[in-house]
Amino acid sequence: MNVQTISRFFTAVFIICFLAAPQAYANESQTLNMGWLMETAKTVILTNSPWSDADCIVEIDHIPDDISLYRAGRIEVEGVLERIPNSLRDIGAVNVEVYVDGELYMVFDPVPYMTVTVNTFVSAGDIERDQVITENDVDEIAVDIRTLPSSETYGSLDEIIGLAARMNIQVGRILTDGMLEPPTLVQRGDSLIVFIPLGSAHIILNGIALDSGSLGEDIRVRNPDSNVIITAEVTGLSRATIHLLN
C-alpha cells in the first residue's frame, strides 16, 4: 500500500466520522415539556409571598413549543425566586431552572406566557376631596398585577370605609393609601366639647380648636374663659379629651 493509498484511506475514515458525529449527537437529544415548566412557575407564584398572601390567580395564556435538549441525562426543573419580590408587580423575580444530571442547562422566563391577577378596590364613581368613603363608593375588581400602581393598595373593604379622600378621585381609579386618610373631625376654629377624665367621673369644658385634626390626633385647644392653651386628643366629631398625667 503506497503513501497515496494510505492518505486516501485516512481521509475517508475522517469524513465518515465527521458525518456520523452529528447523528450521534442528535441521538442524545431529548424533549423538554414546556408545560412542565409553566406549571412549575405557577406553583412558585401561588406558594410564595407576596402573591400567596394576596390570593392571586395565575392563568397560563400560552405554553411555548417543546424544545430539544442536546444532552443525555435526567431532566429536573426547579422554580426559583431570583430575588425577594418588592411588590406584587415584581413577577419578574420568578424563573424556572432546568438541570440535566444535576448540572444547570438553562434558565426559563415564564412571565411572557402567563397572567397574574389580584382583586383590588376602585372608585365606583367620582369622589370629591374630603368626601367620606362609604360602601357605595367602592367596587372590587380583578386586575393584572402589572397594572397595579406603585403605592400600597387596600386588602379589604373595611380598611377603606370611613376614610376621607385627600383629593378628587375619578371613577375607576385603583384606590391607594396615598389617596385616602382619616376624616378630619375637628377644624381649626371649631367649638369643642372637652372631656377631662377623673377616675370614674369626668369634667366637661368648652374649648376652641387651634388646629384641625383626625381621630386620635393631638391638637391645641384654648379655653375661652381662661385663654389657657392645652393639648387634647381628638376623640370624635367636635370632641376632644385632655389626658391628665398621674
Image (spheres, rainbow, N blue to C red):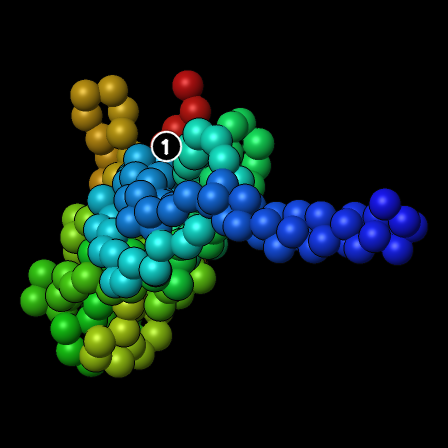
Q: Determine which residue is flagged by label 1.
A: 243
Q: Quadrant of residue 171?
A: bottom left
Q: Quadrant of residue 39?
A: top left
Q: How far across and how far down the image is residue 129, in percent?
A: 29, 75
Taking the image as shown, residue 77 lies to the left or right of residue 35, namely right
Decide if residue 2 is in sight here.
yes
Between residue 93 and residue 77, name the one nearer to us: 77
Mark 1: which secondary structure? loop
Up the image or down, 39 lies above or below 151; here it is above
Between residue 127 and residue 113, name the one nearer to us: 113
Taking the image as shown, residue 2 lies to the left or right of residue 77, namely right
Q: How far across and how far down the image is residue 28, in percent?
A: 49, 41
Between residue 139 and residue 142, name the one nearer to us: 142
Q: Quadrant of residue 133?
A: bottom left
Image quadrant in which the N terminus is located: top right
Q: How far across and how far down the image is residue 196, in percent?
A: 29, 34
Q: How far across and how far down the image is residue 205, in percent?
A: 27, 45
Residue at x 44%, y 29% (from the top left corner): 74
Residue at x 22%, y 30% (from the top left corner): 202
Amino acid carrying label 1: it is His
Picture mark count: 1
Up the image or down, 145 lies above or below 170; here it is above
Image quadrant in which the C terminus is located: top left
Between residue 42 and residue 46, name the one nearer to us: 42
Residue at x 80%, y 55% (from the top left corner): 8
